[in-house]
Amino acid sequence: MTLKDDLGRGVTLTRPARRIVSLTPATTENLFSFGAGNLVVGVTTVDTFPPEVKKLPRVGDFGQPSYERLFALRPDLIVLDSATIPLAEAEALARKVRCPVFVQKSQAVRDVARHLRQLGTLTGKPIDAEKVARALERQLAAVPRRAGRPPRVFVEVSSVPLYAAGPGSFVDDVITLAGGINALKTGGPFPQVSKEALLVARPEIYVVALGPGETPRAGTVGVLADHLFRPTPRLARGLEALAAALRAKK
């Protein structure tokens, strides 16, 4: 089969993938979500969910995987989710590892369900993936939004240096679906923001990403990072948490 990825490349498999290396945590989580986790033979050093990934071999960081480890795992497919990887880099990786590379680009919330369906096709599990995709779509549609004027929302990605979710990111789409408007208007998907630019943005709600067990700083709203920044079925929880915070805004 041949399936077009989000870089516009036709990726051909002679049969459904049976040995997959995932180069991004979101891809790993999505594969496990519909029962294809047993096909994953390698992940990155930052994969943490679900807990089963702790037992899997690590191939390095997404940007600098170890080609030796990739070769040793004998994958028949490499998959990753990146809004920034250029076409030339994806093709170079495929040549070096001599393995098909399928790239997904999450730029909107609707892409999550679409990507689940793509992975279902690639693994020969389209029915299982379809069930998860439809359940996600129902969850997203059921989240109540804030009524009235949308507040200006600033979503902090990291504090030092200060990076935020800008226009063109799927987090920007989450803000809109929650009933808000992104306080940032320029700079690309995840820009570095100066103190001056933050003052100009005048956010009414400042959102910080939290790790497990962390609490938000005073004057901010906390949302679990994995629920907000990973384009997976758990994104529905992030949307629900953000929408609730916006509805509570006076």
Image: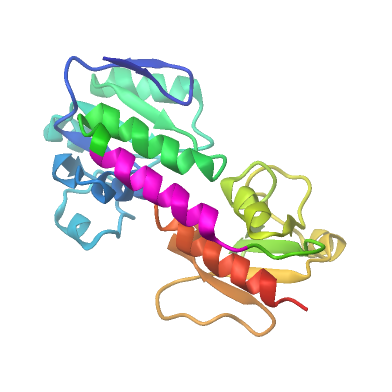
Q: Measuring from the top left, give residue 48's x and y in whole percent.
A: 30, 60
Residue at 24% from the left image edge and 22% from the top image edge: 99
Identify the image quadrant of residue 46: bottom left
Quarter placement of the N terminus? top left
Using the rendered image of the protein, determine whether residue 159 is visible from the camera's viewpoint. no
Identify the image quadrant of residue 10: top left
Tell me which secondary structure the magenta stretch mostly adopts: helix
In the image, which residues are magenta?
A: 128-144
Q: Measuring from the top left, give residue 124's x and y in whole percent.
A: 20, 29
Number of numbered discs present? 0
In the rendered image, the residue lying farthest to the right is 200
Whether residue 202 is in magenta: the answer is no
Looking at this view, is 10 or 54 the one in front? 10
Residue at 53% from the left image edge and 70% from the top image edge: 223
Residue at 61% from the left image edge and 82% from the top image edge: 217
Looking at this view, is 27 or 236 the one in front? 236
In the rendered image, the residue lying farthest to the bottom is 218
Q: Please, is residue 48 above or below residue 98 in the view?
A: below
Looking at this view, is 173 or 197 the one in front? 173
Quarter placement of the C terminus? bottom right
Q: Please, is residue 18 above or below residue 27 in the view?
A: above
Q: Is residue 17 left or right of residue 144?
A: left
Whether residue 136 is in magenta: the answer is yes
